[in-house]
Amino acid sequence: MTVVPGAYGPVPRERMPVEVAPQYARVEDLKRHDAAAWTALFEEAYPLVFRAALTQMGERAAAEDVAAQVFLDAIAGIGRYRDRGHPVTAWLLKITRNRCVDRFRAQRREAPIITEPTVAGPESHLAGAFTLLAQLTSEQRVVVHLRFVEGMPIEEVARLTRRSPGAVKALQHRALARLRTIFEEEEER
Amino acid sequence: MRNPFREEKPLEGMEERLELALSAISDEIPGDDAHISARAQLLDRLKPRQRIAWTPQRTKLAATAAAVLAPMALIGAAAALNGSSGGGGNLGIFAAADTASPSTTSTTTPGTTPSETPSATSSATGTTTATSTPTNTVTTTPSSTPTAGATETASNAAHTNGHGCDDTPPERPPRGQRDTLAVGDTDRQRDANEHDR
């Protein structure tokens, strides 16, 4: 099997090389539990899934656990997966969010608990980002992650979240409006 | 719903500001140990499942097979219970048919080994030539049936050859052509206005 970078990810089909097989062929490989297909998907989507989990959880170790668990759940559930034209990555991101929500429910909370580092540096920068994200809902965090962490356009975020572009814009608008108050409070200080 | 009396502040510049604030997450990559561990778990999970891919079609097939086989198993169990209790179940009918069928065979095909069934043994004593139906007439006479000694020998041979009774080759009758049967009266009987019975 030829592994083509971007074949599973959010790369639009029109930008793919001609020799790339349609996605359903790759889904069939995954359904056959083809090790090469799963390895290719893992290598390509694992960083994205990890950052999605990190955005949700606000904790590196927990995000790594969730990211590993997502692929195990994907293997277990690939038989029920139905290809409706969405990228497989969209399905993985959905699993990621569900696993994070499950963890929050188990801990009886809805957002990550951020501990502010005492020393300024990269860690404090990261903690500041987590503090911002903790003010958002889980769905808003997904959109913010894809838009502002991964830098995807609205249409790509809509594909990966299986929403309309209008719905993505609305979620983004509400998230920005929520965060604006936090920025204003920081400026007043 | 948008409130027309509420003043909305513009969100200009917020996107760039948020992008800058979240740039720390953009640079984050999973650790090598976690990456290797996750990939090992993935491949480990794939190993036992490489032969069996549980697709929806296979799920449907398994459900259909279970739906078909479960009633059959129940019927079989019920029939077995009826048969073991000695009642009048299907198994009893089959058992009766099993006991009745060999005698019918022996009357219609006298060329077979006489020792196969009890009725054949009785014919070996020279008592009668049995017929199952009026139309099925055996052309061989009582004198053509083998003797009791031959019956015992054949019976012993049938049971000692290691293959059981069913595997015993039919013996050629002592007189006449093998397995010649005439349905109804022969020409001679018709001419002489005679009948077997």
Image: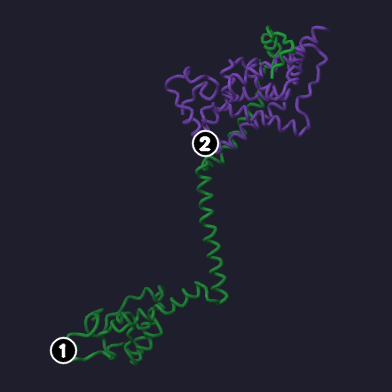
Chain colours: A purple, B green
In the picture, residue A118 is in which quadrant?
top right
Q: Which of the numbered marks, if any, corresponds to residue A21?
A: none
Query: Hey, what amino acid is under mark 2?
Result: Lys
Q: Residue furthest front?
A: B5
Compare residues B83 and A122 and report the one nearer the observer. Answer: B83
Query: Hey, what amino acid is under mark 1?
Result: Asp
Compare residues B163 and B91 and report the one nearer the observer. Answer: B91
Distance from the alpha carbon under mark 1 to that under mark 2: 82 Å
Which residue was labeled with disc 2?
A31
Badge 2 crowding class, 10 Å Cα cut-off, few under 14, some 14 to 19, many 20 or more, is: many
In the image, residue A72 sits, relative to residue B104, either above or below, namely above
Task: Say left or right for B175 vs A122.
Answer: left
Q: Secondary structure at mark 2?
A: helix
Q: Nearer the viewer, mark 1 or mark 2?
A: 1
In the picture, residue B107 is in which quadrant?
bottom left
Q: Give the residue drawn at x 42%, y 20%.
A: A18
Instruction: Name the subunit of mark 1.
Output: B
Q: Secondary structure at mark 1?
A: helix
User: Residue A96, how many percent across, how many down?
Assistant: 65, 29
Q: Give the residue drawn at x 51%, y 56%.
A: B68
Compare residues B51 and B119 and report the one nearer the observer. Answer: B119
Task: Say left or right for B93 vs A77.
Answer: left
User: Residue B21, how many percent across, how many down?
Assistant: 71, 12
In the image, residue B135 sits, relative to residue A17, either above or below, namely below
User: Residue A78, how many percent across, how many down?
Assistant: 56, 36
In the image, residue A36 sits, relative to residue A155, either above or below, namely below
Badge 1 crowding class, 10 Å Cα cut-off, few under 14, some 14 to 19, many 20 or more, is: few
Which residue was labeled with disc 1?
B191
Compare residues B152 and A138 and report the one nearer the observer. Answer: A138
Task: Please report contact status of discs 1 and 2: CB closer than 8 Å, yes or no.
Answer: no
Which of the image's four quarters has the C terminus of chain A? top right
Instruction: Name the subunit of mark 2.
Output: A
